[in-house]
């Protein structure tokens, strides 16, 4: 295979270097294209554009493969914990016991937020969406670390990572408590990451609360499956904001807001609302499928389709299987799970979906488990953000390490008016 691609433009031939990744993905390096040809490329939605090289996560969309630092997510979901997977993503290796204990200790020691931040919650209406609260609280955290905002001070960044990972969990649980008018529950140092979150979410001051071990295991699995996904919309946002040398808090707060969108992480809330709507209307999945195929309906089958996966999202496979296991252990049946399964069956036998390679994605079944755990629908995307945080942190660090220090600044092709002269008011129509 040649090391170059040849481009013929206006009678000239240019050689553009070929880049080949460790899993044999190929790219044409166009970094010198404009300087040499005065042309740029155009790729709305960046479906054909690699923004960076990365060593963190590998996805094969055609085969439905997802690996974090080379480890298949199926193995991590079964054998690892969220804290261990977060360490792997951020440090390129599975931790030994000392490293894991030290990391856990950092997360335990830095789980509280400044007491003054509790007053921030009083300003929000009880109906405020927890993603709005999460993003503004994470951004406001920067006010409490004014001396730690230099993205190039590696020692500071290393100290900040576990603090952000731990405090965002506290902020999320506090926003839930505030939304239901209950007192916030402070973290308990004797509990590990996921158990502590469940404790802060569901304990009340008036009686002891025993965290359910099955729920802890399930939450670990869910957060692991959401932990990173290469250059998705919110991760690209974190990288882009970080490329301006904005501090870590600002970059993560921006990522949270990008994730909130219903085309992205907000889809898990939309899926649940869609399933509830179908259930209210008698469970007629045929009508939903017909609407999803009708471009004029404005309805999409939420939790279906993906820019990269043109096969079953491997995360959805694990989550779907877990739905049955968890509900069986809880001795519960959820009509919404049955509706989701019937929707999947109908879609995957319909040419509209098959031809477009539309399969269930990570958001299609996750809400069924969150609901079974007692987590309210508006908190579903917050759960996605909690899971995705180590990925954002790892990608942000990699961007600063490898990014040649340049700000992300895409070009455009202008299609507006040519130059024209200013028109005084009395001559305007
Ligand atoms: C996440 O990028 C990531 O990695 C994201 C993520 C991560 O971990 O970070 O995996 C998490 O965001 C998962 C996706 C969650 N979003 C949803 O479930 C929302 C519903 N899905 C769609 O809106 C859509 O599939 C996207 C946004 C996920 C992908 O959009 P694309 O790649 O831009 O695809 P498209 O809109 O161009 O669709 C291609 C065709 C179109 O039809 P035609 O024009 O060819 O006739 O497929 C159709 C679309 O109308 N289509 C759907 C559909 N998704 C695509 N039709 C009905 N229902 C759907 N869900």
Image: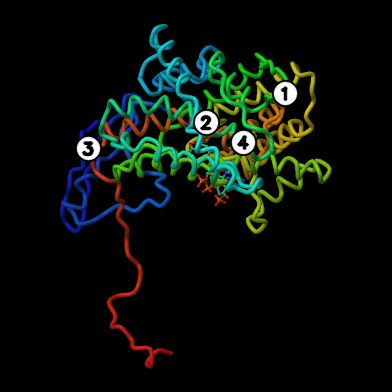
Q: Which residue is mark 1?
A: 206
Crowd tier of the residue under label 3, counting other residues whose Cα lies within 10 Å: few below 14, some 14–19, many 20 or above: few
- Please tell me whether mark 3 sits on a helix, a strand or a loop: loop
Q: Which is more toward the observer, 130 or 238?
A: 130
| The quarter of the displayed image where residue 361 is located | top right
- Give me the residue at 31% from left, 30% from top: 398
Q: Which residue is mark 2?
A: 386
Give the CA separation, mark 4 to mark 2.
10 Å
Determine whether 365 is above or below 246 in the image.
above
Residue 156, x across and y down, in percent: 30, 28
- Give me the residue at 59% from left, 28% from top: 316
Which is more N-terminal, label 2 or label 1?
A: 1
For the view shown, which residue lies furthest in the front direction? 116
Q: Which residue is mark 4?
A: 380
Q: Are marks 4 and 2 in contact (CB under 8 Å)?
A: no
Which is more N-terminal, label 3 or label 1?
A: 1
Residue 37, x across and y down, in percent: 18, 54
């Amino acid at each position: 295979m040649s090391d170059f691609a040849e481009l013929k433009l206006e009678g000239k031939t240019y050689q553009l270097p070929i880049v080949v990744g460790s899993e044999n993905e190929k790219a044409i390096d166009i970094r010198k294209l404009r300087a040499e040809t005065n042309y740029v490329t155009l790729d709305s939605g960046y479906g054909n554009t690699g923004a960076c090289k990365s060593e963190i996560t590998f996805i094969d969309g055609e085969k439905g493969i997802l690996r974090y630092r080379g480890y298949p997510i199926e193995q991590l979901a079964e054998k690892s914990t969220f804290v261990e997977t977060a360490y792997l993503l951020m440090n390129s290796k599975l931790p030994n016991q000392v490293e894991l204990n030290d990391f856990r200790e950092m997360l335990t020691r830095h789980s509280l937020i400044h007491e003054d931040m509790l007053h921030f919650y009083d300003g929000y209406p009880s109906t405020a969406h927890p993603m709005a609260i999460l993003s503004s609280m994470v951004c406001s955290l920067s006010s409490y670390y004014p001396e730690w905002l230099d993205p190039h001070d590696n020692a500071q960044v290393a100290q900040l990572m576990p603090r952000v990972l731990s405090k965002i969990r506290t902020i999320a649980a506090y926003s839930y408590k505030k939304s239901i008018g209950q007192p916030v529950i402070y973290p308990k140092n004797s509990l590990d990451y996921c158990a502590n979150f469940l404790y802060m979410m569901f304990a009340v001051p008036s009686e002891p609360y025993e965290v359910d071990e099955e729920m802890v295991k399930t939450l670990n699995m869910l957060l692991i499956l959401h932990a990173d996904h290469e250059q998705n919309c919110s991760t690209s946002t974190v990288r882009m904001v970080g490329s301006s040398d904005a501090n870590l808090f600002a970059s993560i707060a921006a990522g949270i807001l990008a994730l909130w969108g219903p085309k992205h992480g907000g889809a898990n809330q939309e899926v649940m609302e869609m399933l509830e709507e179908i259930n209210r209307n008698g469970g007629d999945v045929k009508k939903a499928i017909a609407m999803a195929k009708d471009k004029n309906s404005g309805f999409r089958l939420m939790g279906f389709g993906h820019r990269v996966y043109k096969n079953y999202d491997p995360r959805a496979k694990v989550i779907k299987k877990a739905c049955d296991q968890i509900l069986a252990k809880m001795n519960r049946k959820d009509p919404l799970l049955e509706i989701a399964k019937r929707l999947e069956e109908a879609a995957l036998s319909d040419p509209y979906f098959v031809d477009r390679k539309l399969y269930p994605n990570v958001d299609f079944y996750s809400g069924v488990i969150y609901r079974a755990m007692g987590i309210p629908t508006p908190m579903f995307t917050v759960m996605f953000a909690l899971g995705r945080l180590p990925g954002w942190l790892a990608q942000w660090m990699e961007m600063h390490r490898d990014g040649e220090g340049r700000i992300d600044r895409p070009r455009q092709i202008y299609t507006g008016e040519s130059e024209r002269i200013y028109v005084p008011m009395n001559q305007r129509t």
